[in-house]
Image: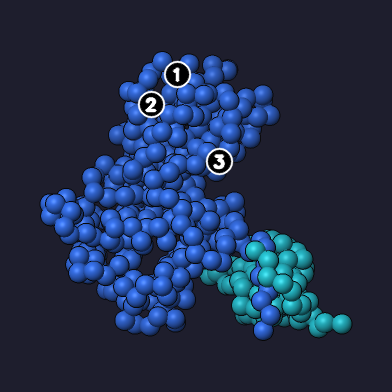
Amino acid sequence: MATVAAGKRKLNMARAISEGITQEMRRDDRVFCLGEDIRHVGGVWGHTAGLYEEFGPKRVIDTPISETGFIGAAVGAAIEGMRPIVDLMFADFFGVCMDQIYGSAGKIPYMSGGQVRVPIVINTAVGGNYCDAAQHSQCLYATFAHLPGLKVVLPSNAYDAKGMMIAAIRDEHPVVFMLHKNCLGVPFLGLEERATVHVPREQYTVSLDKAAVVREGTDLTIVSLGICLYHSLDAAERLASEGVSAEVVDIRSIAPLDRETIFDSVARTGRLIVVDDDYRSYGIGAEVIASVTERDVGILKASPQRVAFPDVSIPYSRPMEQFALPDAHKVLLAARRTLRIQ
Amino acid sequence: MNPTIPISWEGDGPAVVTQWFFEDGDLVVKGDVVCELMQEKATIEVNAPADGRLAITASVDAEIEPGTSIGSIAVERAAAAR
């Protein structure tokens, strides 16, 4: 049969991730998946769809609700030379299995003097905006990123998601691979259509330690990630109509943080806003701002601003949740503060 | 003249088109997910029934009844293009 390939095939993030995992499982028989509902449902987000049908029960393993057990099993398998991809479903659930993640996966490579590697990928979904209340809507970027020994990433579109997933599977270190529910392509979770983009059919990697300048500007730098990146782009568009040129940077890699790219941008614009949907205090905003100011506070023309979730649990009520979540309007207000526009 | 194969919604009850993954007129490969529908909270993927050129008739947010055509594939074999 003749080969026909479309030039502009788009995938949503969930599909892009399952395609990346599928291609790696074909390439390397040490790669396998385990977690809750990944087999028959294809993952509650659809990011393991099709894997069981192709690879069967030995490489796609459904587990009981037993995070400590199956993440511990994945850490052990990684130590023994396998390449597990393990599904934590919601970042909110890490509390029951954190010792396996930061005590074992994060520490064993260091404590063995680098002799023992733990090449594990932990998939976990983050974010609210769909009325799932306080225990199923958190982001917890800073909680994971605070701990040494873990890489923590959050792609914001399907192209990056596939390339970063392949890079994460091939990485020698534990990677916490966060999936923002609003960007995955699942309509009832709040569908951000701009996250669904052209994805090449072949394998490729996207670096796990590089931020990306996704919109160039000269007056102001907005640093963001996940769904908040799209709020930031919306705010930048609105600012452009008011004669302000905003640069927007996608963090992509929370840990390690690409401080170079961020600093270079702020050095050009002189103004900095950080936008994320994790709790405000001790968070990404604080880390980004500190990273810039401790290197050279002199590049700033105005005080940096944080836009984040307030330091309260996430409400179930839609009006209350919307009141608290970052959005384009809140980014715009922060921009006007830093630009001293009333 | 190459045949044209309709893409229709054959499920139970109405659904809504949530996303097209190709542009109108794009070449697609048999099995590609060309479109996604939502029925209540369930997402339904629609695959291309053949290689060929896609024509879109139901736009995003359109509500479709069972048996309705949402697009078609004009069967075509072309050189690979990325």
Q: Which mark is residue A214?
A: 3
Confirm whether circles 1 and 2 share one chain: yes
Output the chain of dot 3: A
Display colour for chain A: blue
Q: In which quarter of the image is the N terminus of chain A?
A: bottom right
The kind of residue on which mark 1 rests is Leu
As measured in the structure, the alpha-carbon distance from the residue carrying label 3 to the one carrying label 2 is: 19 Å
Confirm whether circles 1 and 3 share one chain: yes
Q: Quadrant of the C terminus of chain A?
A: top right
Residue located beneath label 2 in the image: A292
Residue located beneath label 1 in the image: A300
Q: Which chain is cyan?
A: B
Please indicate whether residue A80 sits to the left or right of residue A89 in the image. left
Dot 1 or dot 3, earlier in sequence: 3
In this view of the protein, which residue sits in the foreground, A340 or B68? Answer: A340
Secondary structure of residue under mark 1: loop
